[in-house]
């Protein structure tokens, strides 16, 4: 039976859990690829897509992973054709994450022909030694070649994803990487500090004393990122995200965001609903959070038996939901306009979170005006810690 909610859902996330090999830092659910299991996954995904299709009027679609671009042409054709039959194509923003090692002209052309109009490419670094350190399967040369391939296929909205504070990364290396990446002229840039997650090789190496974390260097790298991206014409609209603007399309979206901001991610940060498909994928519909099983075999078995592969459901109270929405929204540079927060959540930020806003302002992490609350530049650097205050 199709699952229905009170209103059509505008965002869809699809998790592709396969990679050529697991990266040293990765804590997302993913596994080394296997041809037969991938085919089984695709068949199960098509079943799950059919279940939610009638509940969707999609404005954004995002295929993440893992490495979605590891799927072959036939597998992508099956997925995209099924989406076409279900009326799920035509989203204003349709993103697919790609690894530079798995981009081909044929695959790029196929994706573009079905309405994929945004690519997020996991570059991470342009230093060969650091790529090896992270366990990446691509080389720096593949980054430039794949970028040209995507441009030739007609992609006019490309995100390049970087990491900083990588063990062994110096400021000179970071400066050189930024220089080369900014010269490529992508429409969007994402850059995240390395996070040491439990159960990753990088975390084990840190605990074993193989390297130390230099917080001062990480802060300096972040400042370098903000300065250099701004000078190159990118607008920082979220803690780790920078996008170019295009005046003609800006008014149609919102004055607080540049034209090439990732609309799918903005929906997360603004507390919007979304369906999540695939192993380990999370969904959020009407205040109810769901999470699929983080096990591809079990995911397939459940759907083969006609059931959603949902491991857990959690219904949030209205206040808890509003607190979570407040916390996520603070990641945006524009912060939370008070009236928009009231419209989205039904709660007043100035009533339930006045003490928290005051505390952040006293710390120099936040600033309050007549119409909104937002984090300062130093507050954005510690957005996760700031956001914890708003959770209920």
Image (cartoon, rainbow, N blue to C red):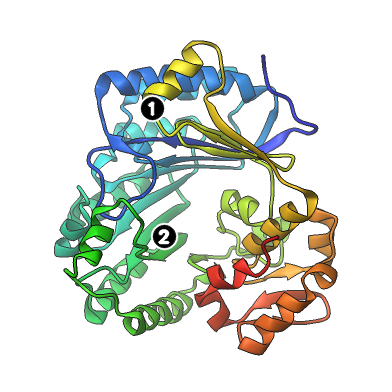
> Which mark sits nearer the N-terminus, 1 or 2?
2
Residue in the image at 83% along x and 72% along y: 350
Where is 90 relative to 75, above or below? below
Residue at image position (65%, 70%) is 389
In the image, is residue 114 above or below residue 306? below
> Taking the image as drawn, is residue 199 in sight?
yes
Badge 2: residue crowd in 10 Å (few <14, some 14–19, many ≥20): some
Locate residue 205, reporting x and y percent: 20, 62
Q: Which mark is residue 296?
A: 1
The image shows residue 16 at horizontal and vertical percentages of: 40, 34
Q: Position of residue 362 (x, y in %)?
A: 67, 89
Could you tell me which residue is drawn at 34 percent across and 19 percent down?
A: 39
Q: Residues within 10 Å of mark 1 (few under 14, many from 20)?
A: many
Q: Is residue 272 left or right of residue 116?
A: right
Closest to the observer, 118 or 225: 225
Position above or below: 326 against 376: above
Q: Report the front residue among 133 and 334.
A: 133
Camera-nearest residue between 208 and 308: 208
Judge whether 295 appears above or below 227 on screen: above
Spatial CA span between label 1 and label 2: 34 Å
């Amino acid at each position: 039976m199709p699952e229905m909610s009170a209103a059509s859902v505008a965002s869809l996330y699809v998790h592709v859990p396969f990679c050529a090999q697991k990266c040293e830092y990765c804590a997302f659910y993913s596994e080394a690829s296997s041809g037969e299991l991938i085919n089984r996954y695709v068949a199960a995904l098509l079943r799950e897509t059919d279940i939610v299709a009638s509940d969707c009027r999609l404005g954004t679609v995002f295929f993440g992973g893992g490495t979605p671009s590891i799927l072959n042409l036939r597998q992508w054709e099956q997925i995209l054709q099924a989406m076409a039959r279900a009326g799920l194509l035509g989203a204003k923003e349709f993103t697919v994450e790609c690894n530079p090692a798995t981009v081909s002209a044929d695959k790029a052309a196929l994706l573009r022909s079905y309405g994929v109009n945004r690519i997020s490419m996991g570059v991470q670094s342009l230093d060969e030694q650091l790529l090896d350190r992270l366990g990446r399967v691509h080389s720096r040369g593949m980054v430039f070649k794949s970028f040209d391939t995507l441009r030739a296929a007609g992609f006019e909205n490309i995100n390049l994803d970087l990491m900083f504070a990588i063990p062994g990364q110096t400021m000179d290396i970071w400066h050189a990487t930024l220089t080369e990446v900014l010269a490529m002229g992508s429409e969007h840039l994402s850059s995240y500090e390395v996070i040491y997650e439990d159960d990753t090789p990088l975390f084990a190496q840190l605990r074993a004393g193989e390297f130390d974390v230099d917080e001062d260097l990480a802060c300096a790298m972040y400042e370098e990122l903000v300065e250099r991206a701004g000078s190159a014409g990118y607008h920082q609209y979220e803690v780790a995200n920078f996008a170019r603007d295009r005046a003609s399309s800006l008014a149609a979206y919102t004055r607080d965001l540049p034209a090439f901001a990732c609309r799918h991610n903005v929906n997360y940060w603004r507390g919007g609903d979304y369906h999540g498909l695939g192993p380990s994928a999370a969904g959020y519909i009407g205040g109810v959070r769901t999470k699929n099983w983080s096990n591809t075999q079990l995911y397939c078995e459940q759907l083969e038996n006609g059931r959603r592969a949902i491991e857990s459901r959690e219904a949030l109270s209205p206040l808890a939901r509003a607190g979570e929405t407040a916390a996520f929204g603070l990641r945006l540079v524009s912060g939370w306009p008070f009236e928009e927060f009231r419209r989205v959540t039904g709660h007043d930020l100035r009533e339930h979170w006045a003490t928290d806003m005051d505390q952040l302002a006293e710390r120099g992490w936040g600033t309050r005006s007549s119409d909104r609350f937002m984090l300062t530049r130093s507050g954005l650097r510690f957005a996760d810690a700031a956001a914890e205050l708003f959770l209920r």
